[in-house]
Amino acid sequence: MEISKLHIHDIIIIGAGPCGLAVAARLCENTPSSLFTEAEHRHFHWMKASNSSKRQSKPVRTSRRSNTSLDRLLSGPSVSGKLDILALDATSDKWMGAWNKRFEILSITHLRSPMFFHPDPRDRDGMLEYAYRNGKEKELKEIKGVIGKSLSKHQRKQKAKNGHRSQETTYLDERDRNDFFRPSTRFFSEYCNDVACRYNIDSIVEKSTVTSVSYSPNEFADGGIFTLQTSTGVKRARNVVFAAGPATPPTIPPTCTFCHKNPEGVSHAFSPHPSPTSSLPDHVLNKIKIGRNTSVAVIGGGLTSAQVTCAAINSKISKVYHLMRGPMKVKHFDADLSWVGKYRNFQQAAFWGAESDEERFEMITEARGGGNFTPEYKKLVLDLVKTGQVDMFENIEVVDAEWDKNIDMWKLKTEPSVEGLCVDHIVYATGAQADFMSIPALQSLREMAPIKSVNGLPCITNDLQWNEDIPFFFSGRFAGLRLGPFAANLEGARTGAERIAGRLAELCEGERSDSGYDSETYLGNADDVDMRRLGLGAANQFGVLASNRVTFDDESE
């Protein structure tokens, strides 16, 4: 079939993980909830007032701020009518297929994220409500050590006068306790399936690998068309959303100068595995089956490395050597707690107010701080150290290794040196490098409309769009320069989906009014009058009479 005669989708989403699901669900939601509560915004504005040098007196507390932004009190923009959406995923024909597989292989029982990090656009507390409604409270695990009563400014001064050391800022107090539980892996999977079924998008995922994306800007009078070369044929769409994570195969770091000596003896934690339930290769699993002692070296200092270590012990590995280039760091989340607690709007405002993308990247790097363990996995690994099943080495680096064919084992050389370090297999748990410039599928777009990148992250618009003329969007870690340190996790998935939906509402429905809402929807249809806007004084209660759709029973009057 000629390409010009192929079906044209409204939107193609590349990637069926949490970011892709969040975008698809958001585009199907007519009344999405606000991303931030009114209480959060009131506190943020109070902080701004408190820090202002021009403030002469205390701000007067009222029931409603006079400068409350309407887009924070009301639902965001939506696209009316049913969109033709197709999702393409390289590993599965189901939502969250690769995500669920990775969690299964690493035997991860609970997520790291709190309850308000999820891809559901309908309600910030949707996952918590789902747990209570379905009686699944027991599948939630409390995130201990983050809830505490904050000290007031007066209390901090009194402690300082009494000689006490200044207490580190506590970002979360008792009212936040219900939010800071972690869902089980099974519960989160069920919730994502519920979201997909609710919006009737559970069957739009196609297993297909995208190899090339090109754009014809003037193919039609009303806009351009994307042409995607995929493993299942050519696809066409008016808009494309890239939500495929790092989008490049996980690779062993170039510092591994010995991998060529026995490629089967070295693997990456995120590489495809022959076993559906283990990250270990067959030759190691065969040794376990016949009862031989086995050993594995895990290289990395992030949470994944801890999960690989625990999974290896659960797979009956006799000994695991955990090697970290730096010291062990512990965090509840992959960014500082200040980006999660009640001061996060202040942190986000500083990020959005940065003068350059280079400065934003530095803020991301500082907030994330490199690889780290959660307190839970720190305890699990240290307990294994106590039993002798794991040996942990901090501030150490593997500089070389020799494969001994006589014993079928690696002999590792480290700096500083550790004598007698022999292992059956080496696993690199060093994450996946995200480099926008190295994605082969986007080469055509980069040549057609080059855009700048900073340390592998593209410099896109605030709507997460390639540029103002090309409706190609990024969600996930490649939107980091616009969303901040949490762009790559579940919170970034929902925030990114909100921005993308706002721009797609403009592209699919025409220009909206200056307030960000379609005046015909809110004022021109008597059946769709938004009572919230009327109550806030943001709309004229008689404006609905101007609609041509309104008729009167008695025309003589």
Image: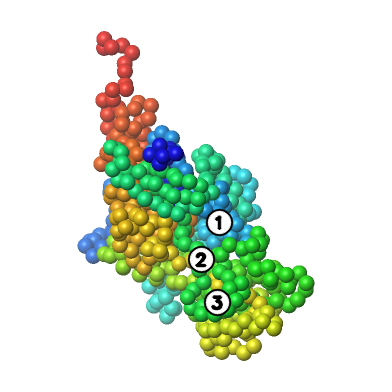
Q: What is the number of the mark on residue 99?
A: 1
Q: Secondary structure at mark 1?
A: helix
| Residue 396 in picture, x, y percent from top left | 53, 83
Which residue is rendered at x = 48% and y = 46% of the image?
A: 233
Marks 1 and 2 sit apart, C-alpha to C-alpha, by 15 Å
| Residue 17 in picture, x, y percent from top left | 51, 53
Residue type highlighted by circle 1: Trp
- Dot 2 surroundings within 10 Å: few (below 14), some, or many (20 or more)? some
Q: Secondary structure at mark 2?
A: loop
Q: Badge 2 is on which residue? A: 250
Q: Badge 3 is on which residue? A: 260
Give the colour scheme shown.
rainbow
Whichever of callouts 2 and 3 sits on the residue coming sooner in the sequence is 2
| Residue 225 in picture, x, y percent from top left | 35, 43
Which residue is rendered at x = 42% and y = 59% of the image?
A: 440
Q: Secondary structure at mark 3?
A: helix
